[in-house]
Image (tube, coloured by chain):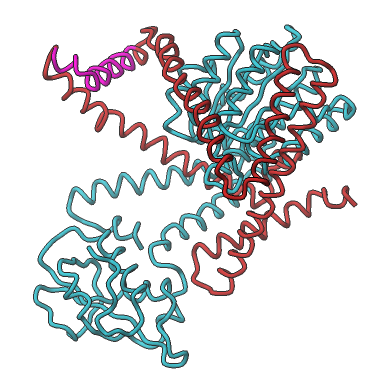
Chain colours: A cyan, B red
Amino acid sequence: MNSTRNCAHSCGCPLVLQDTVLRLCNRVDAEDVSLSFSTRFNSREKKWPRTRSALVLLTLYAAAGAGTPPGAKLKPIKSFKLVDESYLYSCEAFLGENLEEILLIISGRAFSFVVLVLSFVFFYIAIQLAKKGKAPKIRRMIAMDAIDEAVGRATEEGKPVHYSPGYAYMSLSSEQGPQTLASIGILSYVASLCARFDVPIIYNTCIADSLPLVEETLRAAYRNEGKPEAFDVKCIRYQPGQSEYVSAVLGTFQRERPAVNMMIGGLYYECVVIGEAANVIGATQIGGSANIHQMPFIIATCDYAMIGEEIFAGSAYVTKDPLVTSGIAGGDWMKMLLIAITVIGVVLELAGVKVITQLLSW
Amino acid sequence: MSNVLRRREIILFITGIVGGLNLFEYFFAVKEAAAVASAIRTWVVIISAFALGLGIITAFRVHISHVKRRTKGQWPFSIWLMGFFVLLTLIGLWDTKFIVYDWTFKNVYVALSTTLYAITGFYIFSAAYRAFRARNIEAAILIVSGVLILLRNAPIGEAIWTGFPILGEWVLMKGQVGGMRTLTFVAAVGLVAFGIRTLLGMERGYYGGE
């Protein structure tokens, strides 16, 4: 599919067509049916509407049927098929006047929006239940419970605890950012324990923009334990790259022999290297990441593993505050709903009914 | 002043506004919201650039301390690190065409990074050795699957029996896909839940809250 061709009318709507064609191609799978569509020229502003708004219109109205001539009368359809791009570009049709103003939501994201709104509703219900003393129960997270035991071991051995959030594309603003934030949330709890039991903590990272957050988190943890003077900012060690970071951690292990290694966050290849190096020095290990590709290495190298979403729930779990943990339950309800939709979708899809598929791409 | 800026309400307010605006911009085609969200993302880039400077200060603070205290097994490396940092900065400023800088980067940094990455192979081997112990039924399934994948990838597998690549392919493309997709799915929902908790101010750990 040549998606860079201009509209046959030379009307200045190449982006609209390009984007729409790509979207439609992703949705259709059958053959031998032509497609006709168009968008509305904004006569007031003398220009074509913004791409995103136009997409809604374009995907709502299409004429289907083999051999449909250009300029055919349009009708709304629920599924459409596409074969001939040149034919597509030569089609011409017009829409009603007010659709663009009414439908602001971006095409293909409506279902996600509904899911988000439902999530908020579930959260609200869970919080209200917690306020009434009927907090939903959440399951035990063994890896989180093991943190106390691990810090206790470090206390007995008189050795430091090492904590690391992984590579995470070296930025909080990357797609790995939420994992780093979740990791810092867990760090807050670990640092509190370390402050309480006078165990030194070492934090190695290559994520520069997380440094102020980490420093504040550690400082607050020591302050909350009544030992602000015990906090040494030099326990935060920054290395400006993945390889430097891995090397620094290996060096830390060799020189300072921590009793505990925790690596929780957006882990990449460092996970296996750090994990194995920690095993060599006999450290207790707690690992966790939502990066599925690193999961086998975490499970192979660590004594306790947080799988996938557990790292996101971890910082809420350790608070033991029913109001906060009810948020985890709200997420679980959402999960159940989505699993139900998935199962129903599979059954309907096998029966040839594409309602759920269309709903997901709404 | 710094205590005022550290107030929980201010942090929550900024988080809520920034997060809410970007969510709105993602779902709705409103020109004004897109402009504001775009400006916020530009600020993120600027703040990140400042954070890099902070990172350098953090690193120097730690390493100068090591040199001052003559930390055993550490201080010579600290001198090496700081010396090389200053040297490369000067080269970068002086060498406007980046010829020397590029040469140094490719022939020192990239070579060292590649070497370190290559070590991963050995670590994977030792991790696999420990993981592949049939302590229970799950571990036994893991071993069988791992061996099938090994025999699929290694030419010797096909030489032993032509069925090994087929079985390995099945494990890779079918057997494990369901589990991996489940993890991805659950992690995604967990991420959404985490985002909502953050927006609602229920996640306090990341800014030092109790």
Residue found farthest to the bottom: A44
Question: Who is closer to the viewer here, B112 or A331?
Answer: B112
The answer to whether residue B156 is magenta is yes
Q: Which residues are magenta?
A: B140-159
User: Looking at the image, is A152 positioned above or below residue A163?
Assistant: above
The C terminus of chain A lies in which quarter of the figure?
bottom left
Q: Can residue A333 be spotted in the picture? A: yes
User: Looking at the image, is B66 positioned above or below residue B13?
Assistant: above
Residue drawn at the location 47% of the way across and 73% of the way down: A104
Position of residue A10 in the picture relative to residue A335 (left or right):
left
Position of residue B125 in the picture relative to residue A75 (left or right):
right
Q: Main secondary structure of the magenta part?
A: helix
Q: Position of residue B87 (x, y in %)?
A: 69, 35
Q: Can residue A320 be spotted in the picture? A: no
Residue drawn at the location 81% of the way across and 15% of the way down: B70
Q: Position of residue A60 (x, y in %)?
A: 31, 73
Give residue A293's quadrant in the image.
Answer: top left
Q: Position of residue A185 (x, y in %)?
A: 67, 36
User: Looking at the image, is A261 positioned above or below residue A229?
Assistant: above
Residue drawn at the location 54% of the way across and 32% of the way down: A310
The N terminus of chain A lies in which quarter of the figure?
bottom left
Question: Who is closer to the viewer here, A334 or B65?
Answer: B65
Position of residue A190 in the picture relative to residue A351 (left or right):
right
Give residue A353's quadrant in the image.
Answer: bottom left
Q: Position of residue A203 (x, y in %)?
A: 69, 27
| Total tally of numbered discs in the picture | 0
Residue drawn at the location 74% of the way across and 24% of the way down: B79
The answer to whether residue B33 is magenta is no
